[in-house]
Image: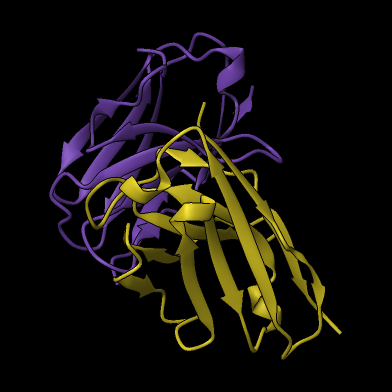
């Protein structure tokens, strides 16, 4: 199975900050990497797929990059509605696996 | 508007069974792979199973293979998860999620989920 390791597990940031979250795969996954945002008691929301493709309707302050085993999600200017937990997911092979999550909290 | 609405969760004893349903609307169910993804209380996301558009191909995570069965009824716009021999570690919110046209995919729409609690 491919293990997905996210870091940090949590972070505190202020509105307007640039935030970067890292996701590392235990083996190469080409560009089969997606990112999700989840708020408490809500369903996950798709943000990015294929490493860097923005889901329709997602603000352009979200961006993704990386290749092979190392990937990043960047929020260029954190907004109040961005405080949430973020998960990465690989879809290179079965079983489909997720990172442990990164909780973005208000500083 | 794409909507996925799960139902069927509840409290069940270890060893018991439960059948979850997911009602899909706002898109043509028969065009997409569909998945179940679960989230234990306070924990991360775990993919459980998925099923091909016509139901001819299915994949499972090892921890549920042989106990859970995913199925679909495209005419009824519904996805199902039959869960047997339930264990305490199966306690989670179960989400249905829409995949893509092809195999091995990410999920562009998710339902709110239904809570399954396995406890005596």
Q: Is residue B112 above or below residue B37?
A: above
Image location of residue B102, percent across then percent down: 22, 51
Q: Is residue A84 visible?
A: yes
Residue B39 in percent (x, y) is at: 60, 58
Residue found 18% across the figure and 37% down from its top? A66
The residue at the far right in this view is B120
For the C terminus of chain A, the quadrant is top right
Vertical order, B87 against B49 (above or below): below
Question: Looking at the image, which is closer to me, A23 or B32?
Answer: B32
In this orientation, which residue lies closer to the viewer: B23 or A50? B23
Q: Image quarter for residue B9?
A: bottom right
- Left/right placement of residue B103 relative to residue B65 reads left
> On the image, which quarter does residue A15 sit in?
top right
Q: In which quadrant of the rendered image does the N terminus of chain A lie?
A: bottom left
Query: Measuring 54% from the left and 44% from the top, which residue is drawn there?
Result: B24
| Residue B94 falls left or right of residue A45 | right
Regarding residue A100, the answer to whether it shows in the image is no
Residue at 54%, 53% in the rendered image: B76
- Count all numbered tags in the image, as a single digit: 0
Looking at the picture, the colour scheme in use is: by chain
Image: A46 above or below B87: above
Q: Is residue A28 left or right of residue B10?
A: left
At 48% from the left edge and 71% from the top edge, which residue is drawn? B70
Residue A101 location (% of width, % of height):
50, 47
Q: Which chain is yellow?
A: B
Pick the front one: A46 or A104: A46
Image location of residue B71, percent across then percent down: 47, 69
Colour displayed for chain A in the image of the structure: purple
């Amino acid at each position: 199975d491919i293990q997905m390791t996210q870091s940090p597990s949590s972070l505190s940031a202020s509105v307007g900050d640039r935030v970067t979250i890292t996701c590392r795969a235990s083996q190469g996954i080409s560009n089969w990497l997606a990112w999700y945002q989840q708020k408490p008691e809500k369903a996950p929301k798709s943000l990015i797929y294929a490493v860097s493709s923005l889901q329709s309707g997602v603000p352009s302050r979200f961006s993704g990059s990386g290749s092979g085993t190392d990937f990043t999600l960047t929020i260029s200017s954190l907004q109040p509605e961005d405080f949430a937990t973020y998960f990465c997911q690989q879809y290179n092979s079965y079983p489909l696996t997720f990172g442990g999550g990164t909780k973005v909290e208000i500083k | 508007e794409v909507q996925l609405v799960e139902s069927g969760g509840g409290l069940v004893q270890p060893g018991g069974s439960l059948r979850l349903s997911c009602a899909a609307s706002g898109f043509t169910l028969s065009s997409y792979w569909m998945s179940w993804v679960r989230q234990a209380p306070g924990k991360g996301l775990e993919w459980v199973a998925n099923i091909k558009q016509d139901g001819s191909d299915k994949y499972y995570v090892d921890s549920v293979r042989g106990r859970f069965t995913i199925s679909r009824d495209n005419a009824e716009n519904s996805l199902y998860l039959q869960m047997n021999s339930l264990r305490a570690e199966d306690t989670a919110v179960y989400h249905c999620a829409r995949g893509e046209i092809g195999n091995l995919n990410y999920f562009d729409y998710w339902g709110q989920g239904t809570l399954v609690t396995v406890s005596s």
